[in-house]
Image (spheres, rainbow, N blue to C red):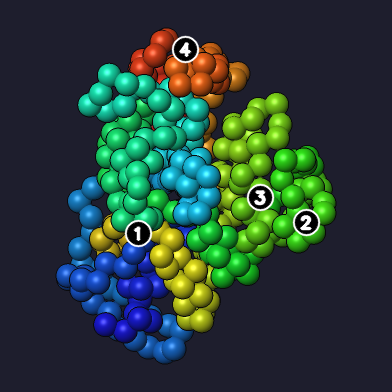
Amino acid sequence: MSFFSKKNLLIILAVGLFFGLFFLLLNQSQPKEYLFSYNSYNDFDIQESVRTKNSSLNLLLLGIVGEGSRGQFATDTILVTHLDFTNKKIALISIPRDLWVRIPNSSQETKINGLYAMENRGKKFSQATKSSFITKKAEEITGLKIDETVILELEGFGKLIDAIGGIDIWLETDVYDPLLINPHKPTEIFHLAAGWRHLDGDLAIKFVRSRYAPEGDFYRMRHQQQIIAALKNKLTKLADVWNLVTWLKIWQSLNNHIIADLDFNALWNIFNLIKDISTDEMEYLQITNRPPDELLSTTTYTSESSAQDIYILIPREGFEKYQKIQEYIKEKISS
């Protein structure tokens, strides 16, 4: 099977569209009942004879800092992507990393962003393939059955942005974070002026990590959704060109930085759904403690090991009570 087959290009496109988005180690098996015809260097025709039986697909996308960093397996990005193939809809649902949860199959409690690390303690990233704890918890919170879980390291995310030539985003207000440095000028703090801004990989990493604002982590969640929308726009444009050199760069950028497994049937349907939906038509949902929905409450937990109060979030109805959150999500994605 040629590296430059349509199958590989579709896989790479799907990876980029979901953040980052964060998809896929190539499924090496040949797809069944698909007919390919090659017309020219940049022109492929595909005749599809089988479609997935599922009318929807739910992907859990986890972003981590990665090996060599403090909290390398903490999932600072927890994003459920709901794809409705029947009604041609996409919803991005951000779960805050500070949500306090009960560890599956246990009486112990922790922040949700520690569940993936808990299952993969002491492992290298290439071996950190267990994600059942956080996947199960995401299902309990959202009421959605998770079909696939995808984990992406921050370094791979930055390389992906560089591989596609950067992305453009619109900022309504300045982004200013004295806790981060300008990646291009280490003597300066991180600052992006309002207006259209072009981000390379280093700037994009800073942008998705910044949370220096009254909203804190919810500020960062909004940035993450904005980056996904920009990635979707850029990669959809690139798909029209089918520049093989560009797709090769994208594939190489994600190599060794992503854990996932999706079959070709699912990828092909994802691609067809994404390319026809504008970012304005996508639904962006955040589970927060802020108006108008106020689904969460802010409280503290006293750590026995350090005797310090830890900032946490719990559902307004009480610890581990997710019915209102599930109703909110169901209403939004079905409206």
For label 1, the SS is helix
Residue where numbered disc 2 is placed: 186
Counting other residues with Cα less than 10 Å from the Cα at mark 4, is it few (<14), some (14-19), or many (20 or more)?
A: some
Image quarter hosting the C terminus: top left
For label 4, the SS is loop
Residue 28 is situated, as x and y percent measured from the top left of the image, at 25, 71
**Which kind of residue does numbered mark 2 sit on?**
Pro
Counting other residues with Cα less than 10 Å from the Cα at mark 2, is it few (<14), some (14-19), or many (20 or more)?
A: few
Residue placed most toward the observer, 73 or 34: 73
Name the side, left or right, on which 123 lies relative to 230. Answer: left
Q: Check whether the beta carbons of the residues at disc 4 and disc 2 lie within 8 A of each other.
A: no
* Residue at left offset 61%, top offset 46%: 208
Residue where numbered disc 4 is placed: 316
As displayed, is residue 219 above or below residue 175?
Answer: above
Residue 327 is situated, as x and y percent measured from the top left of the image, at 38, 21
Residue where numbered disc 3 is placed: 206
**What is the C-alpha distance between the residues marked 3 and 4?**
31 Å
Q: Which comes before the other along the chain, label 1 or label 3?
A: 1
Counting other residues with Cα less than 10 Å from the Cα at mark 3, is it few (<14), some (14-19), or many (20 or more)?
A: some
Q: Is residue 288 visible?
A: yes
Please give the label number shown on residue 126: 1
Q: Check whether the beta carbons of the residues at disc 1 and disc 4 lie within 8 A of each other.
A: no
Residue placed most toward the observer, 149 or 142: 149
